[in-house]
Amino acid sequence: MTTRVRPPIATDLDRIARLVDTLHQTYDELRTLVGPATDALIHLPSATAYAFPETQRDFSLMETAQRRHADERAAILDAMPAQVAILDETGQIVAVNESWRNFGRSNDGPAIDSSVGMNYFDQCRATDDPARADGLQASKGLEQVLSGQSDLFVLQYRCDSPTVPAWYQMTITPLGSGVRRGAVVMHVDVTEHYR
């Protein structure tokens, strides 16, 4: 069901203009009373926060900067030839790059971005082939990096594609310095070293 909004009629426009004037006068009075350092006021009965216009503008600028920063981070990840996943502190995959997605598509793996939200620990432990020991070793290495016991974990392992044998090097490093906020997992094809 679509709700139709009727255009304002002349009397509505006059009332809107008066309310905007009242709002402007109220803003001037409040700004004088609370000073320039106050960002917002709260109407206690309704628990509604009212941000001053300059605060709203600052929020808008911050949101724009955050979007631009997120786009730049995604572009940097996608520019890397290695398969890269960003994990949170619990091991959940929060982002992957284009190489990771391509690997999944070309090896009958998860659909595009479907690995986002999965837990990497579960993926390491779920393997039921002879490489299971590698998966368990990777799980232990990830645990050490996330807990702060190690700043680096490296593992070379075999992971054949549907058509050819292949070897990879996994590197896990902490995300952030000081307080651990997760980890970066990188897989690089090192098959050439095994031929």
Image: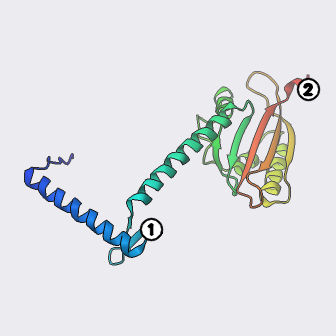
Mark earlier in primary sequence (2, 1): 1
Residue 87 is situated, as x and y percent measured from the top left of the image, at 69, 49
Left or right of 195: which side holds 99?
A: left
Mark 2 or 1: in front is 1
| Quadrant housing residue 73 | top right
Residue position for label 1: 36
For this rendering, which residue is in front, 60 or 4?
60
Q: Quadrant of the C terminus?
A: top right
Crowd class of label 2 (few under 14; some 14 to 19; many from 20; radius 10 Å)? few
Vertically, is 86 above or below 24?
A: above
Residue 6 is situated, as x and y percent measured from the top left of the image, at 14, 48
Q: What residue is shown at x 82% (from left), y 25% (from top)?
A: 165
Q: Secondary structure at mark 1?
A: loop
Q: What residue is shown at x 80% (from left), y 48% (from top)?
A: 173
For this rendering, which residue is in front, 40 or 174?
40
Crowd class of label 1 (few under 14; some 14 to 19; many from 20; radius 10 Å)? few
Numbered tag placed on residue 194 in the rendering: 2
Left or right of 89: which side holds 148?
A: right
Residue 159 is situated, as x and y percent measured from the top left of the image, at 80, 33
Vertically, is 1 above or below 25?
A: above
Single out the residue that lies furthest toward the bottom. 45
Residue 22 is situated, as x and y percent measured from the top left of the image, at 22, 65
- The three-letter code of the residue at mark 1 reads Pro
- The three-letter code of the residue at mark 2 reads Tyr
Left or right of 15: which side holds 38?
A: right
